Amino acid sequence: MEDHGGNVLEVAKKMGVEPQEILDFSSNLNPLGPPPGVAEILAFLGSRVETWAYHPPLFPWELRRALAHRLDLKEEWVLPVPGSAWAIYEVAKVFRPQGVALSQPTFADYARAARAVGSRLKELTLREDRSFKLCLGEMAWKVEDETDLVFVCNPNNPTGYYMPEDELEALVRWCRDKGCLVVVDEAFLPFLDRKGMAPVVREYPNLLVLGSFTKIYRLPGIRLGYVVAPPNIVEKLLAGMPPWSFGSLVQEVGVACLREEGFVEESRAYCRGEMAFLSQAVRDVGLKVFPSTVHYFLFKAPSDLADKLLEHKILVRDCSTIPGLGPGFYRLAPRTRGDNEKLVGVMREVLG
């Protein structure tokens, strides 16, 4: 199993402390937490016997309608899924691509899903001296006759680079002419004031867009995401989804999130401010910070920094195992101002 950030429960158990004692900077979730209204619903539904004692609807029809309305699409173009990670693996299983193109560094599960079905990986290693910017031409060069699928994380994780929509659309057109499916993972798009690729999905039979509730609504324990794709692709994915894939709690929380007004915009503004503060503070410590368009960023530091911070019960994302990076690369995502200031103070201390 690939490493991921946010392993607070495992780390706390290993250290013999309570999870809430650890300052977790390793996950790039919304520091504002779930929307207040959603938190109230979670508390209410969690204590209601009906939530657990009866079968949920076979399929989350109400959630699908709410998503389609939010995205301004017909329902057959939208599919709720039990986490966007589920969709990544399901796409690989359904289409069984001969060749899969992707950039590195990026989200680890694209390569893992491809390897699981025996696909041949065609990896583009992004250059540090270009701040890990994804070049359209270089990515298109990876799409050969044997390439059936391209994964693009936009904004990319862990680099934070965002490929503009016009460039990404040009890649989709190139792949369409090659008979290649493009999967664009927009798990972090809500943190940016950008339209993304969902509005143009009706124009391309080879485009599939992934979205997530995990990051912007801070609901990692509620596995919920969605797919936007042509109806024929949606039907193929739906065919492999078992009944009752979404519990009652998940379905109601998903609808409640979509009813929240202003939360996403408030979160964007907050994260933008704390990102500016934390990234500059890390630079002031004397470390190299790479540019990012979202609320998390890569930086370079001594390879033992993560261990030293953990002695102070501070967890950061060690990126040493991510292809295209290596020892000394880390990812940070801001928390509250007080937590951010504490992190910077401890970094100054341990780095001398």
Image (spheres, rainbow, N blue to C red):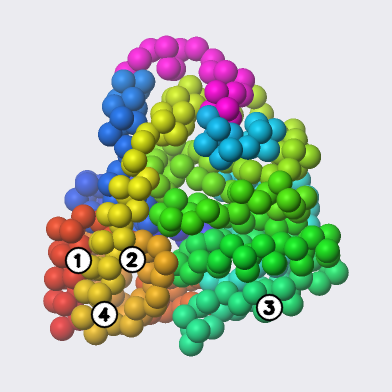
Task: Please give the residue where the numbered disc 2 appears in the rendered image.
Answer: 332
Left or right: residue 201 versus residue 222 is: right
Question: How far is disc 3 from disc 2 in space, using C-alphas?
Answer: 29 Å
Amino acid tagged 1: Leu
Q: State yes or no: discs 4 and 2 in contact (Cβ < 8 Å).
A: no
Mark closer to the observer (1, 4): 4
Task: Please give the residue where the numbered disc 4 appears in the rendered image.
Answer: 283
Q: Position of residue 114 (x, y in %)?
A: 69, 59
Picture quadrant of residue 110:
bottom right
In primary-sequence order, the first of circles 2 and 1 is 2
Find the magenta span and give its range: 47-65
Q: Position of residue 321 (x, y in %)?
A: 48, 71
Task: Please give the residue where the numbered disc 1 appears in the rendered image.
Answer: 343
Question: How far is disc 4 from disc 2 in space, using C-alphas?
Answer: 13 Å
Q: Residue at x 35, y 48 (%)?
A: 265
Q: Secondary structure at mark 3?
A: helix
Picture quadrant of residue 76:
top right
Q: State yes or no: discs 3 and 2 in contact (Cβ < 8 Å).
A: no
Q: Is residue 170 visible?
A: yes
Q: Is residue 150 above or below residue 92?
A: below
Task: Please give the residue where the numbered disc 3 appears in the rendered image.
Answer: 137
Amino acid tagged 4: Arg
Instruction: Tell me the crowding category of disc 4: few under 14, some 14 to 19, or many 20 or more residues within 10 angstroms, Cα based.
Output: few
Q: Name the residue nearer the viewer: 174 or 324.
A: 174
Q: Secondary structure at mark 4?
A: helix
Question: How far is disc 4 from disc 3 in space, using C-alphas?
Answer: 32 Å
Q: Name the residue nearer the viewer: 340 or 188.
A: 188
- Magenta stretch: includes residue 60: yes
